[in-house]
Amino acid sequence: MRVTINGKSEQVPAGTIEQLVRQRGLKPEALVVEHNQRIVRQAQWAQVRLQEGDILELLRFVGGG
Amino acid sequence: MKVGIAGAGGIGSNVAAFLARGGVRRFTLVDGDRVEESNLNRQFYFRDQIGRLKVEALAENLRRIAPDAEIEPVALRLDAAAMATCFDGCDVVVEGFDGRIEKKMLLEALAPRRVAVVSASGVAGSALDSITVRRLGTCTVIGDFCTDAGRARCYAPKVALVAAMMAHVVLEKGGYYDNPIDP
């Protein structure tokens, strides 16, 4: 299945946002996920199934403010 | 426009100052910390304010720019539940927390409420050339996205540059700029 992640078209296995985050080895604690222009809270990652053509932004915060 | 300032450190205090200069007159300031000497290299406080609550010192400094400003100072360390309700009535919230986990918490708390958030990620260190802008949902995030404050100190030029870019996003959203004359 093809989706766009951070502006790049990529082939990913079917599954949920939670599975995608795990497959990519991303640490969830400072990660924010935007799915089709809406931020999805971490508590809902397991409920959102990815569809062909979805657009995702994965942003990992660093500290300092 | 009413602006929430979540964290009144290097980002929050400087963004608030730029906004007051730009015409914003309604603020909710939220932070539980007090001014320390080590803050003075980059934060909008003065030596005679050391030991005072940041929200009270910042309210005073903003009123020196804009005596007519309506400022609500809230001396509180925000948890996830408070993040969702503390900024009720704000049109935009400026995220200026130090911790990366709190940053994520604020975006996730406010996103479902469709509140615009302007946030910082990567303000430590001295390199200015890698600062970029990313947009997620109703949020705008500005910084270099890689230099963690655990690995580098924070200095005035980079912190103030990111703060100025964040203030610009708020001023643009709020219509505080005059229409430009055709170039």
Image (cartoon, helix red, strand yellow):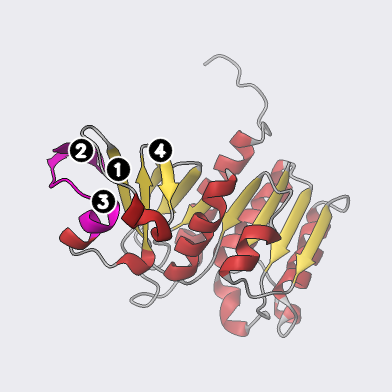
Closer-to-camera residue (B7/B90) = B90
Say above or below: B22 vs B108: above
Q: Is residue B118 left or right of residue A60?
A: right
Q: Which residue is mark 4?
A: A37
Disc 2 residue type (three-letter): Val
Residue name at image x 37 percent, y 65 percent: A30
Residue B7 at least partly seen: no
Q: Residues within 10 Å of mark 4 (few under 14, many from 20)?
A: some
In terms of image quadrants, where is residue B60? bottom right
Name the residue at 44% across, 69% down: B101
Q: Which residue is mark 1?
A: A56
Quadrant occupied by the N terminus of chain B: top right
Residue at mark 2 to residue at mark 1: CA–CA distance: 8 Å
Q: CA distance from mark 2 to mark 3?
A: 12 Å
* Separation of marks 3 and 4 at Cα, in angstroms: 17 Å
Q: Residue A16 got which mark?
A: 3
Residue B23's x, y, as percent?
A: 74, 42
**If you read the primary sequence from the N terminus, does the residue marked by circle 2 or circle 3 appear first?**
2
Q: Is residue B171 left or right of residue B161?
A: right
Q: Check residue A2 for magenta coloring.
A: yes
Q: Judge from the rendering whether residue B18 lies leftward or rightward of residue A27; answer left or right.
A: right
Distance from disc 1 to disc 4, alpha carbons, whole Å, reads 8 Å
Badge 1 amino acid: Leu
Q: Position of residue A57 (x, y in %)?
A: 32, 46
Q: Secondary structure at mark 3?
A: loop
Q: Which mark is residue A32?
A: none
SS under mark 4: loop
Element at label 1 = strand
Residue extending farthest to the top is B182
Q: Nearer the viewer, residue B44 or B102?
A: B102
